[in-house]
Amino acid sequence: MKHYDLLVLGGGSAGFAAAIRAAEADQRVAIIEGGTMGGTCVNIGCVPSKTLIAAANTRHTALHPTFAGLNIGGTAVDWSTVMGQKTALVEELRQAKYADVLAAYPSIDWVAGHGVLRTSDPVTVTVGEDTLVAPRLIVTTGAHPWAPPIPGLADTPYWTSTEALASKTLPGTLLVIGGSAVGLEIGQLYQRLGSTVTVLEGLDHLVAQEDNEVSEALLRYLREDGLTVHVSVQIQRVSHTGARFQVDALVDGKAQQFEADQLLVATGRRPTTAGLGLAEVGVALDARGGIVVNDHLQSSVPTIYAAGDVTGQAMFVYVAAEAGTIAATNALGLGDRALDVTTLPKVTFTDPQVASVGLTDEQTAAAGLDCTCSSLPLRYVPRALANRDTRGLIKLVVEQGTERIVGLHVVAPEAGEIIQVGTLAVKYEMSLSDITSLFFPYLTMVEGVKLAAITFHKDVSKLSCCAG
């Protein structure tokens, strides 16, 4: 039996953040992990997807230069080399950001194996024949891809995002079920690397959590990019014969059949809580299997906390890391902190990207706010003109009277680099005049935020360069 000040069940971003917070307070910690060190993001999520997206976008730019007079060649795809470079980056970051970090904290023990919770007071976890004991436990076991109960699907060798980001071959044709971030990012990168891609989305718009104007713009741009995208799709059945997938569906109520070499199911993720012994000690779970926590990340059992995707809340790695730190702070009595995601920035890494923070104009009424909006097409942003790429818009949602900024929504190739300005504006309740009175460097994309603010009172088409 080994005694610790804190046990952490799960060795991803949230788990490491929790363990580091405890170690910095001179607490002895054990991280228990039955899989690969580093969790989803570095191994099978953010890192592999974003580097493959960068490779795909590089090829696309070479094939479709926006500048006259350029003759760019060398666009053939060596798939194994592309995937090998991706794998090398994953291994490098896993070593640098997890294994090497672990070595820097001698008070953190790494315990490899599947942990099962046995008692809650004190917390007892068994890992094989070993027993670990501590006053508190933080569960950070993350989430896993989820597929809906479509008839026939379970009998086919479909891909989740995990398999799609590790494939040894580039399929000639790819069907994607799911039109949110994961499905669109992977679908577009495969299309840009040479596959013919069709996306099937059940709702009448893409990226369901985003502003409607943003969703409509992204749908238009993806179709212009070469993807076949259908919305309002009801999947009836999936089958696999030989080397081909077949999907029978209703599209706008009409029967249609789709075939492809490979099928990606990107319909969301579910918290990983099965087989951990949580229910047996009284930890409450929600309908999707997530651990129910309060604002301080404490579960229904006072000695057990949870952080990250396992709670089902805001499944982003940067939220998981912050939540891990907060959970450890509270569990060890080092403070009394709450997790607040009301000003959480989100990015979908398509091209153009989609990024948002705060309220959409559709959400303002439910929030009891009287708001107005203004959308600035990128053709009014000088940097976009210089890039010869004016796809997108910058939309501000502003409270009437106070002119307080309550939301920013961006469709642009660099939307993810722009959105943090909106995060600061929403969090610190900045007004339009606060934005318009700031200096924004000329010929940057973020200058578009200032121009969007100016549009509430002026016609930006009648302004000279940098004039506000």
Image: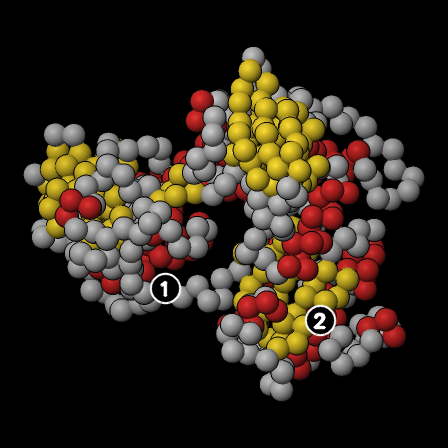
Q: Is residue 374 left or right of residue 388?
A: left
Of residue 158 and residue 387, the one placed in the foreground of this image is 158
Q: Nearer the viewer, mark 2 or mark 1?
A: 2
- Looking at the picture, which amino acid does disc 1 mark? Leu
The quarter of the picture where residue 215 lies is bottom right
Residue 173: x and y, percent? 66, 25
Residue 156 visible to the viewer: yes
Quadrant location, the N terminus: top left
Quadrant location, the C terminus: bottom right
Q: Secondary structure at mark 1?
A: loop
Residue 58: x and y, percent? 71, 37
Q: Which residue is painted at 55% across and 68% down in the image? A: 363
Residue that mark 1 sits on: 339
**What label does residue 114 carry, if any?**
none
How crowded pointer 2 is (Cα within 10 Å; few <14, some 14-19, many 20+) is rated as some
Of residue 257 and residue 451, the one placed in the foreground of this image is 257
The mark tally for this picture is 2
Q: Earlier in the sequence, mark 2 or mark 1?
A: 1
Residue that mark 2 sits on: 374
Residue 404: x and y, percent? 59, 80
The Cα–Cα distance between marks 2 and 1, rounded to whole angstroms, is 31 Å
The quarter of the picture where residue 346 lies is bottom right
Residue 163 visible to the viewer: no
- Looking at the picture, which amino acid does disc 2 mark? Ser
Q: Which residue is painted at 44% across and 50% down in the image? A: 315
Q: Is residue 349 above or below residue 450?
A: above
Q: Which residue is painted at 55% across and 36% down in the image? A: 235
Q: Secondary structure at mark 2?
A: strand
Residue 67: x and y, percent? 87, 44
